[in-house]
Image (cartoon, grey):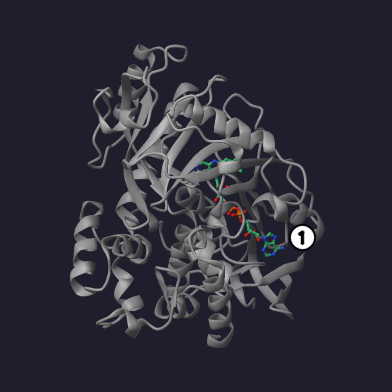
Amino acid sequence: MADYDLAIIGGGLNGVSVARDATGRGLRVILVEQGDLGSAASSASPRLIHGDLVLLEQRALLRVRAALTERDRWLRNAPHLVRPMRFAVPAHPHERPAWLLRSGLWLYDRLSSRGGLPGSATIDITHHPIGNALKRPFGTAFEYSDCVVDDSRLVIANALDAAERGAAIRTGARCIRAEQREVWRLVVIDRGRRTVITARALANATGAWTASVAETVLRVRPPRLVPIQSSQIVVRRLFDNENVYVFQNTDGRLVFAMPYERDFTLIGTVAHVFKGDPAAVSMAAADIGYLCEAANRYFRERIEPSDVIMTLSGANMALNPERPRPPDGAITLDAPRRKAPLLSVFGGDITTARLRAERAVSKLTPFYPMSPRWTANTPLPGGDFGWQQFEAEVDRACERWRFLSEGQAQRLVGAYGSRLPAVLGEAKNRSELGPAFGAELTGAEVRYLMAKEWARFADDVLWRRSKLGLTMPPPDRLALTEFMATAS
Ligand SMILES: Cc1cc2nc3c(=O)[nH]c(=O)nc-3n(C[C@H](O)[C@H](O)[C@H](O)COP(=O)(O)OP(=O)(O)OC[C@H]3O[C@@H](n4cnc5c(N)ncnc54)[C@H](O)[C@@H]3O)c2cc1C
């Protein structure tokens, strides 16, 4: 008898989504992650939850429709983490003609179930807030609806749900060897201790490590994959509205510029084949220059590479990226006779991660009895309110915890949703929440993150459970490190 029905290696979005789906279908699940949850590609994504206009241009209409359906599901099931936004494509005289953009967005509207999101529109931006940040000649823009997501908190929410349904989630646990017999036998270095785990099936969800883990840890023939890197830059806030700009660049690619953590702008994406160690993905100077130039073509305020506050780079594996329509992630099942099955789940958009996990787990139905698919209409932890109610939730938080500013309440509701009382409790004033780290973080929140969300180190809190690392002064970071060392 194996310890678990399914062991998963990798705690990025693909791994935790498989863990959530499988646990909810009644399987006994363990997930091992060598670092922190979401510490690789899943916290360095372009943050888009979308049908993808590029796919529309490639005429992959069924994929656009499927992604838009998933977009609307995320909005319903994670209204705290996924925010609807209006995306604006300024018409550029040297790029796609207006009729093409208008008809493309008309089709995008038709492919969407909309779920209450407004449809596309043509707007005169000469006297519109969207136009304020742009250079003079831009007079028209095409607006449509899509969403942005807090990528690393989406990982945590999936892991939390999996754990609450019974999955074992182990961070700081590296799988160094796995033998495929009638059951899988995994050797894991779990926070320095060697442990052995047995499981009836194994899922390799190690992202950019998929091929190397297959070869060196599982010792099976690795799938033929191409590692792809994607990168974004973060600069100061370049505009004061809550829209996402979509810029058509000189090479025909689309570059997105979105509000990021209140005071910043995220600009991306540049993607290409990646070579090197997935643990050390960094952004080349030429790629930084490319994104700055793309933004400078449109924004009034120029940015230079020296203005870049932070870069976000992640790598993942792709099957056949050179194909005109590369697939959106992949799932493979390897089930040799008399041996336990191996699933590999890699690549793909955040938007379709839930569906990918559902399909991956369904591939195991010949091996175990399993309850039906369930994640399409089940909220993630903290997401049990309508997305239209987000601002009302913020108002309620401001009323209940009167010491919160509007901005603080926005951040907290955006992170914890309806679970915020578990973080702030019955506090009547700020001092009841323990020591303060920077302007926003309190001891109570840190304790919650350590107790419930697997945070072990300051970086886990500053860069994945939140992005407060962007604004926290170094002495407060040091104080946070010391606090966490004594609180654990
Ligand atoms: C080029 C590119 C473009 C993208 N564009 C978009 C986009 O437009 N929109 C969008 O939504 N998404 C996009 N994404 C997707 C997104 O960034 C990630 O690919 C997604 O979050 C899935 O990540 P993952 O779980 O497969 O991998 P990761 O998040 O990298 O997770 C893999 C995990 O496995 C762990 N691991 C590795 N080896 C071991 C081991 N031996 N033992 C234990 N743990 C191990 C690692 O530490 C890591 O945390 C893009 C990705 C790429 C690469």
Count of labels in the image:
1
Residue 370 visible in the shown view? no
Q: Is residue 409 left or right of residue 358?
A: left
Residue 253: percent from left, percent from top: 53, 25
Q: Amino acid at mark 1?
A: Leu
At mark 1, the secondary structure is helix
Residue at screen point 31% across, 32% down: 130
Q: Residue 413 appears at what percent x and percent y?
A: 31, 63
Closer to us: 156 or 423? 423
**To which quarter of the image does residue 133 belong?**
top left
Toward the viewer: 50 or 180? 50
The quarter of the image holding the N terminus is: bottom right
The quarter in which the C terminus is drawn is bottom right
| Label 1, residues with CA under 10 Å away: few <14, some 14-19, many ≥20 | many
> Residue 349 at x, y = what percent?
51, 43
The residue singled out by tag 1 in the image is 218
Residue at x 29%, y 27% (from the top left corner) = 110
Picture layout, residue 427 above or below residue 334: below
* Residue 46 placement, left or right of 400: right
Give the residue at x 60% y 45%.
Answer: 347
Residue 358 or 255: which is nearer the viewer? 255
Residue 295 visible in rendering: yes
Q: Is residue 7 left or right of residue 28?
A: right
Picture coordinates of residue 227 (x, y %)? 70, 42
Instruction: Kindly identify the residue that appears in the image at 25 percent across and 29 percent down.
Output: 128
Q: Is residue 248 above or below residue 483?
A: above
Say which quarter of the image contains residue 432: bottom left
Q: Is residue 424 above or below residue 201?
A: below
- The answer to whether 378 appears left or right of 347 in the picture is left
Front residue of 37/187: it is 37
